[in-house]
Amino acid sequence: MSIVLERLEGQPVACRVVLKDLAATSRLASLIASWFGGKDTITLTGDLGAGKTELARALIRAFADDPAVDVPSPTFPILITYDFPRGRVVHADLYRIQEPDELDELGWDEMRENALLMVEWPERAEERLPADRLDVALYLAAGTRDAADLGPEARIAIVTGYGKFGARLDRLMIAQSLIEQSGFAEAAHRFLQGDASARSYSRLVLGDRSAIVMNAPRQPDGPPLKRGLPYSQLVHLAEDVKPFVAMDRALLAQGLSAPLIYSADLEAGILVLEDLGPEFVVAGTPPAPVPERYRLAVEVLATLHSRPLPRTLNIAPRVERALPSYDVAAMLTEIDLMLDWYLPSRGIRLDGVVREEFRLLWRSALNPAMAEPPTWVLRDYHSPNLIWLPQREGLRRIGLIDFQDAVMGPAAYDVVSLAQDARVDVPEELELELVRRYVAMRREADPTFDPRGFARTYALMGAQRASKILGIFTRLNDRDGKPHYLRHLPRIRRYLARCLAHEELGSLRMWYEAVLPSKDLSA
């Protein structure tokens, strides 16, 4: 049976949930755990014996995605810490705390850093709790308006979002309404590891059916970098969910496998999507390319690039999106990330003259590529975003996701994204096979297709992409505290060296060789 979030009027943002049994409590826990986590704080309040510890146990198991996790009561130890693949959880029961200062002896501030903090009896902590938090208050249903229709095990939960959590709870309620419209009201919720963006995802599982919830709140503009514009606008990154919807419909119209949209709130940026499944174009541990799947993925690109593709896409009736141009200015702004983040991490500081020389060389190299007929550039056409669908036929066996940043630009860019995958090692012989296959298909469709010109643009786009990713992955570590991206840097450096070895990129190669340590350019 589904749970219903009944919105309560007023501030702070709150909703009322009837929990008829333990199964309903577990369902509420899975919903909350799919939406909150990381450095969040969840407090559990309400009646004695109303089931706070049971809810905490269900929340921890949902966060761990493991119903068998042993979750003892922290009443005696006060704090219990868990380490799960998704992150740390600190479960606190402050019943035995008499004064907030006693928390210092437990290492309270250190314990809750970079962890999901779950607190029973939070009133004992007073001001030591963050103002931004989610509170779940549990009450026995007896004596309430629902008592006559409910059994003795029923509980009422009042879920309240304090501070910034009010907006997050509001989004959760919008999402739950869309989930009900999509026929997944009774589904279990499972958190999915997202990408490097601020988007988050969860999987709905209902019997043998599943769907994906995309939570993509509109991102605030960052500080202005050039011409009074923030980075996202300079490089044409999607700032809301509408570009995703436009490209999704456009790819479906081309007969490709993008996810169907079951329900959507375009203003809120919440979508319920078809689940294309958990199987990707890589396999094994560590993940490695499956050649058959990569070959089909490059055939998707060759087929798409051989067609006349519209620049203006439909979002909804009378609502359109014109794909922006992936122009020289955007590419130069992206490459600046290498100068601003990667080089300083290597102890390299450049003066203004050397930086300007860098941009002049790149501008000169990029201009010929911009003269080529533009096509759709999905921009993140690589293993994390390519789903393997063996039950489908032809090109539809490749499922496409994460294409909201699509632009109009050089066809070679997405081919490089696939054949020089930033997250997995693509053997050089497989890379060459993919490029040859792509070129052969393009020439078959158009005898005037220029293989030599494509080879130059391929190397150029590869060098541009590798340069910016060195900066992006360094920034994810230094600014955002995501060190796991650093393990990919040696691979990216090898790709960069491979691309700069192209005979027509000699001037760029000389600049990189003069600035970077020699080991950074070892192919």
Image: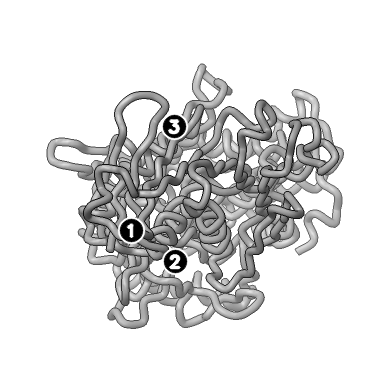
Residue picked out by circle 2: 386
Cα gap from disc 1 to disc 2, whole angstroms: 41 Å
Q: Residue 134's spot in the image, x, y percent?
A: 51, 39
Q: Residue 405's spot in the image, x, y percent?
A: 42, 45
Q: Residue 310's spot in the image, x, y percent?
A: 24, 48
Inspect the image, locate mark 3, and give the three-letter code of the amino acid beneath it: Gly
For numbered disc 3, what is the local secondary structure? helix
- Residue drawn at point x = 74 percent, y = 31 percent: 100
What quarter of the picture does the N terminus occupy?
bottom left
Query: Can residue 288 be seen at all in this image of the molecule?
Result: yes
Q: Tag 1: Cα neighbours inside 10 Å, few (<14), some, or many (≥20)?
A: some
What quarter of the picture does the C terminus occupy?
bottom right
The disc, 1 or 2, on the residue closer to the chain's N-terminal end is: 1
Inspect the image, locate mark 1, and give the three-letter code of the amino acid beneath it: Lys
Q: Given the current orientation, which residue lies at the most extreme left position?
A: 317
Residue picked out by circle 1: 20
For numbered disc 2, what is the local secondary structure? strand
- Residue drawn at point x = 66 percent, y = 26 percent: 127
Residue picked out by circle 3: 166
